[in-house]
Image (spheres, helix red, strand yellow):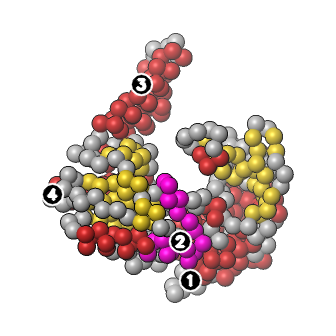
Amino acid sequence: MPSSSNLATDAWVTREEIQKRLEHVKVNKGPGPDGIHPRVLNELSAVIAKPLHLIFQDSLRSGMVPRDWRIANVVPLFKKGSRSQHENYRPVSLTSVVGKILEGVIRDRVLKYIAVHNTISLCQHGFMRNRSCQTNLVAFYEEVSRNLDAGMAVDVIYLDFAKAFDTVPHRRLMIKLRNIGLEHNIRNWIENWLKDRVQRVVVNGTFSNWTSVVSGVPQGSVLGPLLFNLFINDLEEGIESTVSIFADDTKLCKTISSMQDAAALQSDLTKLENWAANWKMRFNVDKCKVMHFCRNNINANYLLNGSVLGVSLMETDLGVFVDNKLSNSRQCHSVATKANKVLSCIKKGIDSRDENIILPLYRSLVRPHLEYAVLGSSP
């Protein structure tokens, strides 16, 4: 277990750091249930940094977390599919902006600690510095492409956790935080931050009743993504196939030249199934798929939770269309369509043709569509 001797000292935040964080609060974001608007915090940063510093220090020392930092307004954000099905919405928690500032302090201290001790697996690309969707896609599909160029068949299994962020068991999460050596005061604060949380759903200005939260890490919080990464960090242990992860999006990859290779991939899939059962997580089998690459692929079947995985000819992986020929045509068509729609809106909505107006709009609204994951699509 790594030593945590320096973490406690580093955790005591300074007033200067608090003021700097207040000055960088995004003022266009909405407030949490406490009603304290980020613009107020931003514009009064020099005045309120001192009292917040005292509150934060006391909270860190005692581990006590104010109730207002443990309540959330949950806004359902539509992902894709039918709008009438609740599973097609992502619940995003709007929490206290003041609480998020201290969450940011703790997150940065924990990130520093795990960077020193190389805690996070290299196969995890989500919510980590110097890693991204693009690093995930490039590293993974370069390996697939390299194997296909060598004439080898490849199977890729795309895995989907059911409500991954919402089902993380708090007690088991705390075990993992202790196992990596996090200092007691930090663990105590995080445990109390997760304890006795309540939330309500907000849709079109209408509020549901308050409901207790007994599991999960809040989506939309500052600490939540890091805690999730730490929870699933040992997912790849004992896996011999290539594993690639972005947050909860997980892929398994293996070259397949015989039924023995397929059996080895099935063995790794079973290990992941057992990991999920041991840690009270669950795969959404209907959304888990296998893609067979190469014409001479033996097209083996794979089982997850007793069900045969469906075979997919095309998947959307981190926003990029991937087919079983590694063709870029569908992705290029999708990107061009999106970019042209935005260009059309600019053309119809902006009378001026002044390049000082048009170019910034193009760079901010059109180019991101054209450049997203472009390295992963390069020959």
User: Distance from label 4 to label 3 (Cα)?
Assistant: 38 Å
Pointer 1 and pointer 2: residues touching (CB < 8 Å)? Answer: no
The mark closer to the camera, 4 or 3, is 4
Q: Determine whether the residue tagged by mark 4 lies in a helix, strand or loop.
A: loop
Q: Which residue is mark 1?
A: 179
Left or right: 260 as drawn, with respect to 199:
left
Foreground of the two, 47 or 238 = 238
Res. 38 in view: no
Q: Amino acid at mark 2?
A: Ala
Q: Earlier in the sequence, mark 1 or mark 2?
A: 1
User: Distance from label 1 to label 4 (Cα)?
Assistant: 43 Å
The mark closer to the camera, 1 or 4, is 4
- Residue 271's spot in the image, x, y percent? 44, 75
State yes or no: residue 282 in magenta: yes
- Residue 10's spot in the image, x, y percent? 61, 74
Q: Is the stretch drawn in magenta largely helix, strand or loop?
A: helix
Q: Which residue is mark 2?
A: 276
Q: Amino acid at mark 3?
A: Asn
Q: Determine whether the residue tagged by mark 1 lies in a helix, strand or loop.
A: helix
Where does the magenta region start and end?
271-287
